[in-house]
Image (cartoon, grey):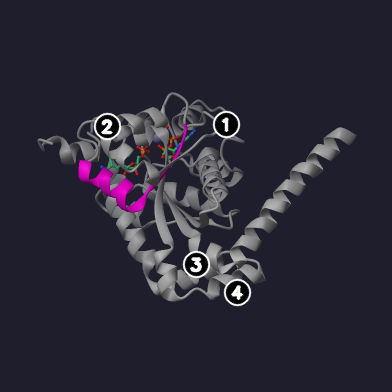
Amino acid sequence: MKTCGHRLRTHTDKKLLSKVWNLTSLSSPMALQERIRVVLLACGSFNPITNMHLRMFELARDHLEDTGRYRVVKGIISPVGDGYQKKGLIEACHRIEMARLATESSSWISVDDWEGQQAEWVETVKVIRHHHAEMSSEDDLHDMVDTVKFTKKRRLDVESFSDHNRSETLQLKLLCGADVLESFSIPKLWKKEDVTEIVGRFGLVCITRGGFDAEKFVYQSDVLHKHRKNIHIVREWVTNEISATHVRRAVRRGQSVRYLLPDPVVNYIQDQQLYSAESEQKNADVILAPLQKYGSTTE
Ligand SMILES: Nc1ncnc2c1ncn2[C@@H]1O[C@H](COP(=O)(O)OP(=O)(O)OP(=O)(O)O)[C@@H](O)[C@H]1O
Ligand SMILES: NC(=O)c1ccc[n+]([C@@H]2O[C@H](COP(=O)(O)O)[C@@H](O)[C@H]2O)c1
Ligand SMILES: [Zn+2]
């Protein structure tokens, strides 16, 4: 017990020390100018949102902040619209509501329904541009500073930024799992110029996922390798194979999904009787929207 307590204290001390170090470095003008504020945007089906989707944000924030170069100020979950037409994709209103319930307990992750409300599927690069424009507007910047829970000292430090400096040190990065990164090479799924803009202009944070080799994929792609400094690969050591497909299958079979999803999401699925054999057949005979869109082009 004693050893255990001692270890815990040492770990806690280290954490505290690193926090103090961060605060001290933030209070020096040099470090303040260097730290880039980051907003993380995750696009996907979230059909339904799982604990792993939420873990992605925590892992990405720790990774970026550990570099000493970034401070993550906001996380946005953007459930895809119904026009994506993926097999088994239930209505956006339910997926958005479940994501809202899942993020109620987070101080920094929220849900944005702009993409989910669009009648037609929207390319991811356009979703990123939309959020980039939104967050770059002065009002939103000030809102963000107010809603993030800074200590008094940090708040003062942030407020001492000139507007000019602030806009130059705020970035939006796409957050995804390694399967989405590898999907960049699927013919007719992504436009080359979209991938170039995502990694070149904005940046990407990618969480490893079993069965996908993100590092190798970046190495093998000329465009990704060129922009590798803008691609942060985050290794999930506590490997976790939760997938929404697994959750839907378990619900269909009447098995428990508790502890794979936040409790309010489990309750919502039960109350609304979501995920049946019938809903899994939705879009079964339809081609995924991006493949429909780019399928006829000769890229
Ligand atoms: N276990 C996981 N590890 C790493 N990334 C994940 C994991 N689960 C989901 N993601 C990422 O979360 C984002 C949204 O994914 P999505 O909604 O497709 O979830 P999913 O669990 O893969 O669902 P489905 O099984 O329906 O494809 C994607 O970027 C995906 O790569
Ligand atoms: N060309 C593109 O912009 C493109 C292609 C395929 C998927 N996506 C996006 O990637 C995400 C993938 O989600 P899923 O992994 O749930 O299928 C969705 O948000 C989808 O809109 C974008
Ligand atoms: Zn998926």
Q: Where is residue 90 in the image (x, y as percent from the top left)?
A: 38, 41
**Left or right: 205, with 256 as reference point:** left
Assess disc 2: are there few (<14), some (14-19) or many (≥20) residues with their C-alpha within 10 Å of its C-alpha.
Answer: some
Q: Which residue lies furthest to the top in this view?
A: 211
Residue at 35%, 33% (x, y): give it: 218
> Relative to 39, is 27 on the left or the right?
right
State yes or no: discs 3 and 2 in contact (Cβ < 8 Å). no
Q: Mark 4 or mark 2: which is in front? A: 4
Mark 1 touching mark 2, by CB under 8 A?
no
The type of residue carrying mark 2 is: Ser
Describe the element under mark 4 as helix, strand or loop: helix
Quadrant showing the C terminus: top left
Which numbered disc flags the more N-terminal residue, 1 or 2? 2
Q: Which mark is residue 176?
A: none
Q: Alpha-carbon neighbours of circle 4 within 10 Å: few (<14), some, or many (≥20)?
A: few
Residue lying furthest right: 2
Label 1: which residue? 237
Q: Does the residue labelled 1 lie within 8 Å of ligand 1?
A: no
Which residue is at the front of the view, 104 or 238? 238
The residue carrying pointer 1 sits among few (fewer than 14), some (14 to 19) or many (20 or more) residues within 10 Å by Cα, namely few
Q: Earlier in the sequence, mark 4 or mark 2?
A: 4
Q: Which mark is residue 156?
A: 4
The amino acid type of the residue labelled 3 equals: Met
Q: Residue at x 58, y 54 (%)?
A: 106
Q: Mark 3 sits on what residue? A: 144
* Amino acid at pointer 4: Leu
Q: Which region of the structure is painted magenta? A: 192-208
Question: Considering the numbered disc 1 on the image, is that residue within a helix, a strand or a loop?
Answer: loop
CA distance separating discs 1 and 4: 36 Å
